[in-house]
Every structure is written in C-alpha cells, then in structure tokens.
Amino acid sequence: MDKFLLAIAVALALTSLICLVRVIVGPTKGDRIIGINVVGTKTIVIIALIAFILRETYFLDVVLVYALISFIASIFISREFAEEPEEEDEQHA
C-alpha cells in the first residue's frame, strides 16, 4: 500500500512539473494564476500523502500552514492582476 501511495506522490510531482511549464509559458495571466494554484494544491496533497506514508502527524500541521499561505498568496496575486487592467483602461480613456 505504501508503494502505491508513493507512486501516486511521484505521479503528482510529475504533473506539477507540467503545471510549472504552464506557469512559465502560459500566454495569459489567468493561465499563470491557475497554474500556480494547481501546483500549490498538488504540493499540499503530496505532503499529506507523505504524512500518511510515514505516519507522522506533524506534517499535517505543515499542510495546514502551507494551504493558508497558498490561499493568501493566490488572493494577493489575483488582486494585483485585477488592478492592472483598470489602470490601462484609464490611460486609454
């Protein structure tokens, strides 16, 4: 069972790398924001899987803190990107 969960964690890590490519190459800002959120979510799941495999509960505290930081960062990045088009619209008016 542990080997199966470890294989899932490796698969999630590989798909996270694919999402990182979308963050770097992504043609729009929306693609980059979604890519960052997906990488953060997959990281949380990987850490939770490792906590389950190792039977260490303190990793779950790390997961909660990482999820909170990821959520706050997503809100901050979204607000920054949302403010930019308004400034551009004022210049063109």
Image: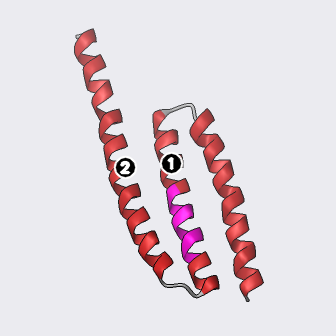
Q: Is residue 80 left or right of residue 56?
A: left
- Please identify the quadrant where the N terminus is shown: bottom right
Hey, which quadrant is residue 16 in on the image?
bottom right
Image spot of residue 19 (x, y percent): 62, 49
Image spot of residue 68 (x, y percent): 35, 62
Task: Bin the neighbour count of mark 1 within 10 Å (Cα to Cα): few under 14, some 14-19, many 20 and up.
Answer: many
Q: Which label number is shown at residue 36?
A: 1
Residue lying at 35% horizontally and 34% vertically, measured from the top left: 81
Q: Is residue 16 magenta?
A: no
Image spot of residue 21 (x, y percent): 65, 42
Q: Is residue 40 left or right of residue 79?
A: right
Q: For the residue labelled by badge 1, is the local secondary structure a helix, a strand or a loop? A: helix
Q: Which label number is shown at residue 55?
A: none
Which residue bears the numbered disc 2?
A: 73
Amino acid under disc 2: Ala
Residue lying at 75% horizontally and 81% vertically, measured from the top left: 4
In the image, residue 26 above or below residue 36: above
Task: Bin the neighbour count of mark 2 within 10 Å (Cα to Cα): few under 14, some 14-19, many 20 and up.
Answer: some
Which residue is more in the foreground, 64 or 35? 64
Q: Which residues are magenta?
A: 40-49
Q: Is residue 20 left or right of residue 30?
A: right
Magenta stretch secondary structure, dominant: helix
For the residues labelled 2 and 1, say whether their Cβ atoms are less than 8 Å apart.
Answer: yes
